[in-house]
């Protein structure tokens, strides 16, 4: 059975795309069949894997011009890439009947091929993100260890609550993880305590430390495991992936 996870935070710069790329790669290396969907018009996930040409992008899928044909990056990992054309999709789809369900319906025929489908949401709460939340079983929220990162949480929790009530009763926030973490900083430790108070056992134990290799890997079209498998970034995302698998094994 496939598990669809939207990785979402409307605040930019929190490591959302970096996390989608590396969680996807880590799960694939653990033997899980994974599909990554790039729902961001900036196409950063697509670029992070060095995908410059594809037969079909998520834009054509959403507009009904084509069936989804993912690009295979390596064994067990496929990507449904994005394109700048996606920036106009919200306006183009705004008058479509059932516009919030387009992504869910489009990927339904291929979903059973995968253990995990991860959706990289844009840094907004518009129609593209609503489509991702409507298609998802679970939502993961990456958070920086900064107080300002916590301030915006109320809005995304509110939006997910509305989607759950009106569009997808099964979706729920099941995971929160901290990025750009430095345990030497009292502020970071205090913020993690605050996040735990709010989310309790939804907060993953793994912390994604600040690591230059995570910023360098996309320029080579690689995930962190293939770029520098011994670095802190690889260690942290490997730990997070194992936590994700363990959680689902207990369900």
Image (spheres, helix red, strand yellow):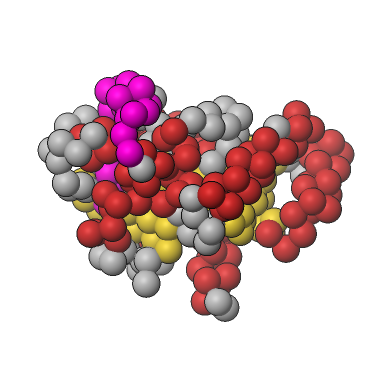
11 left or right of 36 in image: right
Does the magenta-highlighted stretch encompass residue 195?
Answer: no
For residue 89, which quarter of the picture?
Answer: top left
Q: Is residue 226 left or right of residue 184?
A: left
Left or right side of 147 for 209: left
Q: What residue appears at the point 28 percent right and 58 percent down from the top-left corner?
A: 108
Closest to the observer, 192 or 140: 140
Q: Nearer the viewer, residue 154 or 54?
A: 154
At a point 40% along the width and 42% down the height, the residue shown is 100
Residue nearest the viewer, comparing 79 with 90: 90
Observer able to see residue 24: no
Q: Can you give x and y, in whole percent of width and height, for residue 240 in the image?
A: 57, 58
Q: Quadrant of residue 219?
A: top left
Quadrant in which the N terminus is drawn: bottom left
Q: Is residue 247 left or right of residue 60?
A: right
Could you say where residue 189 lies in the image, as x and y percent from the top left?
82, 44
Q: Locate residue 8, reporting x and y percent.
A: 54, 41
Specify whether residue 93 is painted magenta.
Answer: yes
Residue 144: x %, y % from top left: 68, 37
Q: Note whether 138 is above or below 80 in the view shown.
A: below
Q: Is residue 161 above or below residue 151?
A: below
**Residue in view at x 30 percent, y 25 percent:** 92
Q: Give the range drawn in magenta.
A: 76-97
Note whether residue 12 is visible.
yes
User: How many labels sit on residues?
Assistant: 0
Quadrant containing the C terminus is: bottom right
Which residue is most to the bottom? 250
Residue at 15% of width from left, 36% of height from top?
65
When asked about the image quadrant of residue 14, the answer is top right
């Amino acid at each position: 059975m496939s598990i669809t996870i939207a990785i979402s935070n409307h605040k930019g710069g929190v490591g959302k795309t970096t996390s989608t790329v590396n969680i996807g790669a880590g799960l694939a290396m653990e033997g899980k069949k994974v599909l990554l969907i790039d729902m961001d018009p900036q196409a950063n996930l697509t670029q992070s894997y060095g995908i410059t040409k594809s037969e079909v992008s998520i834009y054509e899928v959403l507009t009904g011009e084509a069936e989804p044909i993912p690009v295979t990056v390596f064994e067990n990992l496929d990507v449904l890439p994005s394109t700048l054309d996606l920036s106009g999709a919200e306006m183009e789809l705004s008058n479509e009947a059932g516009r919030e369900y387009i992504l869910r319906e489009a990927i339904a025929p291929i979903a059973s091929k995968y253990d995990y489908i991860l959706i990289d949401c844009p840094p907004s709460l518009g129609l593209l993100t609503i489509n991702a939340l409507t298609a998802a079983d679970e939502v993961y929220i990456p958070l920086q260890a900064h107080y300002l990162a916590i301030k915006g949480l109320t809005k995304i929790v509110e939006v997910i609550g509305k989607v759950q009530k009106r569009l997808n009763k099964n979706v729920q926030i099941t995971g929160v993880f901290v990025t750009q973490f430095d345990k030497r900083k009292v502020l970071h430790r205090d913020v993690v305590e605050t996040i735990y108070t709010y989310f309790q056992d939804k907060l993953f134990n793994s912390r994604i430390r600040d690591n230059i290799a995570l910023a360098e890997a996309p320029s080579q079209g690689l995930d962190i495991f293939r770029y520098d498998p011994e670095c802190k970034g690889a260690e942290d995302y490997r730990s997070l992936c194992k936590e994700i698998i363990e959680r689902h094994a207990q369900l």
